[in-house]
Amino acid sequence: MLETVEQNPDRPAQASVIWMHGLGADGHDFASLPPQLGLSPNMAIRFVFPHAPVIPVTLNMGMRMRAWYDITSLKARGHDETGIRRSAASIEQLIASEVSRGVPSSRIVLAGFSQGAAMALFTALRHAAPLGGIVALSGYLPLHESLPAEASEANHQVEILQAHGEHDEVVPYTLGQGSAELLRAAGCRVEWHKYAMAHEVCLEEVQEIGRWLGRVLAEKTGSRSQETGET
């Protein structure tokens, strides 16, 4: 099980957001974000920020750092398939842990930035049970060629929020936009936002994420309340 940084609500969690960091960062990178999202505390959301394993990264001269998978070629995005699938299995364990703690998969959102966004897309679209949504910031869809054969029917219509900086020199804007177009062509529900920024996160984007999460998780929580008679 990956080590994580957790932020728990003051009562049993009704929803969970598992948020993957980017290359070279760690689980603390986005730990200050939740209070900025403007979400109601009544939603009782648990935020889970896992630490990626420490591995050598070829593109960075073999330096060891936290990474979800190795990057061997910037041009090809260096799809280290073995590493991607290994990290996806670790994220699946985190999903299973949230379910075991009482949060149905339909109210679990996978989110991430850069490499973390790639992992959120890769894992969620293959997850067997329906998830609450995907947030992919400044990232892309890895191993897209294998998706048609591996895509989960349960998450074919999962809501996806993708956002990207128009001046991103690390993950080119066209790569993120192209991933959104691939997903839409496959019938996925993608909401796309672009911002005049580089490889980063801006306030306007954070506010949009908060609105999106609030809507998606409120809908999922409302569905559960109707099913169980909760108020």
Image (cartoon, grey):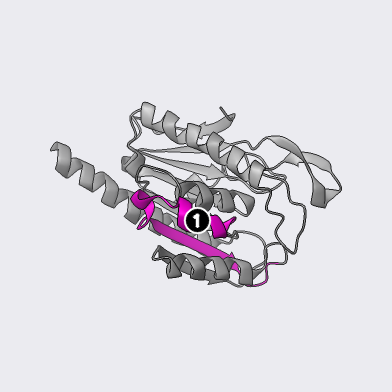
How many marks the image carries: the answer is 1
- Which region is colored magenta? 141-168
User: Looking at the rendering, which quadrant does residue 75 occupy?
Assistant: bottom right
- Residue 177 position, x and y percent, is 56, 70
Name the image quarter holding the C terminus: top left
* Image quadrant containing the N terminus: top right
Q: Could you tell me if residue 68 is visible in this image?
A: no
Q: Is residue 202 visible to us here?
A: yes
Q: Which residue does the image show at 58% across and 45% down from the upper left? A: 30
Q: Nearer the viewer, residue 102 or 58?
A: 58
Q: Left of 10 or right of it: where is 139? A: right
Between residues 109 and 36, which one lies in front from this camera angle?
Answer: 109
Q: Is residue 17 magenta?
A: no
Task: Tell me what residue is drawn at x 71 percent, y 62 percent.
Answer: 76
Residue 137 placement: quadrant? bottom right
Residue wearing tag 1? 147
Residue drawn at (58%, 30%), measured in percent from left and top?
2
